[in-house]
Image (tube, grey):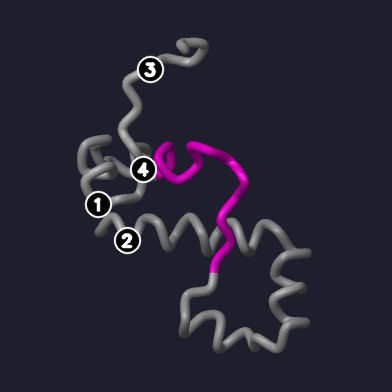
Amino acid sequence: MSLRGGCGLLLKSKLRERGEVAEYVRTRGVKDETAITWRVGYAPAEWEALSKHLVAKGFSKDDIVEAGFALSQSAKPGDI
């Protein structure tokens, strides 16, 4: 699986989990087959959701940053 594929899996699964979001997409005129064709998904409002998902799928943090799906952070939480 590629990094883009891993990203797509997360977004697609999050759309399925959030029924109200999927319904909103339908009310905007997007048919289910169109959503499937265009790989419509939902990005959760969580800062590290994608990074954690991709690491769990076996991708390295360096590869995720290099692909542009995350930024490298040198400060630890609480650092100024």
Where on the picture, by quarter, is residue 20? bottom right
Q: Residue at x 27, y 42 (%)?
A: 65
Check the image and name the residue furthest to the top.
79
SS class of the residue under badge 1? loop
Contact flag, marks 1 and 4 (Cβ < 8 Å):
no
Task: Inspect the image, locate mark 4, and give the three-letter code of the amino acid beneath it.
Answer: Ala
Which residue position holds label 3? 75
20 versus 74 height, above or below: below
Q: CA distance from mark 1 to mark 2?
A: 9 Å
What is the magenta range?
A: 41-53
Per the image, the residue denoted by label 2 is: 4
Q: Amino acid at mark 2?
A: Arg
| Of marks 4 and 2, the one in the foreground | 4
C-alpha gap between disc 1 and disc 4? 8 Å
Q: Is residue 70 magenta?
A: no
Give how far apart the Cα atoms at labels 3 and 2 are: 27 Å
Q: Is residue 42 magenta?
A: yes
Q: Which mark's residue is nearer the viewer, 4 or 3?
A: 3
The first of marks 3 and 1 along the sequence is 1
- Rate crowding at label 1 as few (under 14), some (14 to 19) or many (20 or more) other CA atoms within 10 Å: few
Q: Which residue is mark 4?
A: 70
Identified at 30% across, 51% down, the residue is 68
Residue 62 x, y percent position in the rendering: 21, 37
Q: Tag 4, which secondary structure?
A: loop
The mark nearer the N terminus, 3 or 2, is 2
Label annotation for residue 9: none
Tag 3 secondary structure:
loop
At horizontal 32% and vertical 61% (from top left) the residue drawn is 4
| Residue 48 falls left or right of residue 75 | right
Q: Are marks 1 and 2 in contact (CB under 8 Å)?
A: yes
